[in-house]
Image: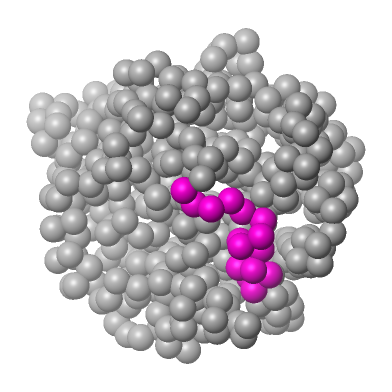
Amino acid sequence: MPLEAYVSTTAVSTSPEPVPPVPDAGEVFAFATREIAAAAADLWPRADVDLGDHVPSVTGYVRRIRVDGRTLYAKYAFLGVSLVSLLRGACGPWPDVREAQQAYVQRAGALMDREAAQLRLLAQQGSLRVCSVAGLARGVLFTESVTGPTLADLLLQRPHDAAELLGGTFGELRRLHHPSAARLLGPARVIGERSIRGTFQRKFNGLSGPTYVERLGAARCAAGDRDLVVGLLRDVVVRLHRLQTTGLPQQASRRVLAYGDLKPEHVVFPEGTSGQPVFIDPGLLLAPPAVDAAKLISRTVLLLAAARPGGETGQQAMDGVSAFAAARTDVLPARVRRAWLRELLVLWLMDSVNILTTYLSAPGALPLPDRGNALVGRAVDLCEMADQLSSELAAGADARAVWDSALGRAQAVAA
């Protein structure tokens, strides 16, 4: 099928150039800052409140804040879409966005309401140790700051312990992944916006897809790199759409309660590795069991690609990823093991394409996190890796052989 049948996005304008007037980043950030200040005043009317730094993000607006000396994080989401989408005009001009936002934050089920509900649910059930909700008002979620090394920090500092670090983190989800836990989460509390498969389908379905792909990197990449990235991603996205029908289970089958946004930077060790980790930014949803493993592996590889710690560290870390996956597959019959590896690979590639294209499509006025800027600089290498692996999967290569190839390619991008 032609590319137009597969590739689209609801996250950007479908015109060759943004249709003016797109929201101005300064106006958007100033509005969010005022809402955070007003929410803090509502919750703590007699407190001494200091607004701290803006924390760069492509999803929501985040600021550090101090309330009577207590450090919190304040998060604000616009209409349930990413800042990239908003600033590229997906929700219309700023006056329309501002009016719609006032209604959005007042209705049940706004994104920050659901995230607060998920954190409280996890804390009440004792399923995981999570950051505490300090308050919720005017669509602003305030959470307690958690200090300590993250899983991302530890993977770079102790790559020889990667298998133990990844396995231990994943093991914390055991109670969450138990079939009985799926009943804990009502439909109104699901955060489907952070689903790997759902995000891929939203970004790359419909008639606007060719425009979206053609514009990737316009404000971020050197011209020569951009041409290569766009050409590679055209083919990768088409293959991944086709692989959905052969490499992924049906949506309704084999679903568990997944953490949904399991990233190395979302796992903090306040007492070091001797203590229980704290999880932040959940995205609980019902999904196949491989979803959490796939996102953890995908983001570990992107962490290595951004940090470029060198060949030895890359090899040790990817040996740990291999051992982590083997601990999940070695107990399975050979046929089931191949199917699980294939599913894991497809989801890994989808997630990597999702986040990389979000960074590449970000307008120049939106500050990216340091890791995002680094990944834009590695876009060619990452797209070549995705092109090679998706080609092997699409050609029907044995899943184990593709998995070994993936480990080798990931190790190379870490060097």
Say which quarter of the image contains residue 124.
Answer: top left
Which residue corresponds to the image point at 42% horizontal and 70% vertical from the top-left?
Answer: 11
Q: Is residue 201 above or below residue 409?
A: below
Q: How is the image coloured?
A: one colour
Q: Position of residue 329 (x, y in %)?
A: 75, 33
Return the residue found at the far top.
Answer: 274
**Residue 278 among magenta residues:** no
The residue lying toward the viewer, choosing from 395 and 85, is: 395
**Residue 249 among magenta residues:** yes
Q: Is residue 116 above or below residue 373?
A: above
Q: Is residue 329 visible?
A: yes
Say which quarter of the image contains residue 239.
Answer: bottom right
The magenta-colored residue range is 237-252
Q: Is residue 351 above or below residue 136?
A: below
Q: Main secondary structure of the magenta part?
A: helix
Which residue corresponds to the image point at 26% horizontal and 43% vertical from the top-left?
Answer: 188
Q: Is residue 325 above or below residue 276?
A: below
Q: Position of residue 112 (x, y in %)?
A: 28, 43
| Relative horizontal placement of residue 1, taking residue 27 as reference (left or right) | right
Q: Is residue 309 visible?
A: no
Return the residue found at the far bottom.
Answer: 16
Q: Position of residue 311 (x, y in %)?
A: 89, 43
Q: Position of residue 10 (x, y in %)?
A: 41, 72
| Relative horizontal placement of residue 267, taking residue 49 as reference (left or right) | right
The residue lying toward the viewer, choosing from 238 and 26, is: 238
